[in-house]
Amino acid sequence: MRNDSRWPKLNGHSEPWVDAIARGLRHESHSLTSVDSHNRLQGILPLLHVRSPFFGSFLVSLPYLNTGGVWADDPSIATQLVDQAVAMADRLNVKHLELRHEVRLDHPRLTQERTDKVHMRLALPTTADQLLAGFKSKLRSQIKKSGEQGLVVQFGGVALLAEFYSVFAVNMRDLGTPVYSKRLFHSILQSFGEDAELCVVRKDGRAIAASLLVHYPGLTEVPSASSLRKFGTLGANMWMYWHLLQRAIERGSATFDFGRSSEGSGTYKFKEQWGAKPFPACWQYYVRQGSPADMRPDSPKKKKLIEMWSKLPVWVTKMIGPAIVRGIP
């Protein structure tokens, strides 16, 4: 891990994230920087070189996360950093450079972009009581009902990793998506220390919902959250998110980041009911070979593969999934 005090403490650009993903997914990291005459950081572009025998190689800022790309004081510095990233993409002969911006950056080499998803974020009050009072009556009733199902919520670190991963792996299989390795989440917990924690919801001692929570100054995000479909009537996902929001307020966060969703989708509506609002997401690409769309889960080419994967035994997906998904940008 780097020990550079100049490193920005921003969501998606923080040093622990780059360190955790590089180690957890076993990717080589590159940090392009710009400093002024006093050695003060003016801009940074963290990149991971994603390589796979199945799909080829890519430069991404940043895989697994919804955000990344360029952080800079002014557009000219941002342009210089992208120039360097484009040169690196050529040198490494990758298929494409992917920058997960939130605001579009004008650059002649970034010729393709993706804007079909939005970040869903909720402004938090100072107390959980204030948050609850601001919910619509239907949501308050759903929270109350889920709280009557005998569900037990626990927050913790590595000790909860096995339970978290058991729920996460099943959920990813059901979605037809290869599962990340347990190593990635262990790496995240290790890199962030007390600023990352797991939440597990149990029914009669069995984990039926789980999530990863990461705290920054003023902001809390949930990069991964899952629940077991066959226990859906218990409202475990609802009860979990209510506790995640309370936890964020306890940590002094002013914003809760639910992650990205397609507008109008089921996950979008779930987040919207909590009061989350959409914020732009603009992923931009310098393409050298193929099409970035081919790597998306919703690509027509992937439909049959997703259907097949969702029917595999979970133990098989745990065995072969991590090797596949680590190579997907």
Image (tube, rainbow, N blue to C red):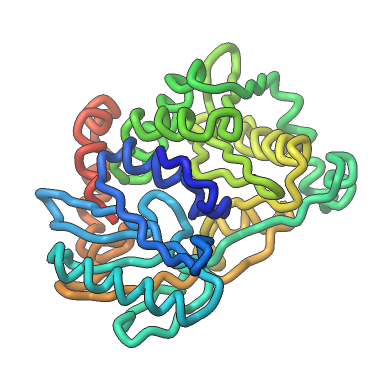
Quadrant, the C terminus:
bottom left
**Residue 183 in sight:** yes
Name above or below for residue 189 compared with residue 255. above
* Residue depicted at x 52% and y 16%: 206
Left or right: where 180 falls relative to 254: left
The spot of residue 10 in percent (x, y) is 57, 54
- Residue furthest top as drawn: 205
* Residue depicted at x 77% and y 42%: 252
**Residue 142 in sight:** no
Name above or below for residue 275 compared with residue 324. below
The spot of residue 269 in percent (x, y) is 62, 58
Q: Between residues 51 and 324, which one lies in front from this camera angle?
A: 51
- Residue furthest front as drawn: 38
The spot of residue 143 in percent (x, y) is 75, 37
Q: Quadrant of residue 19?
A: top left
* Residue depicted at x 33% and y 87%: 108
* Residue depicted at x 62% and y 52%: 257
The spot of residue 174 in percent (x, y) is 37, 40
Q: Between residues 328 and 40, which one lies in front from this camera angle?
A: 40
Q: Quadrant of residue 173?
A: top left
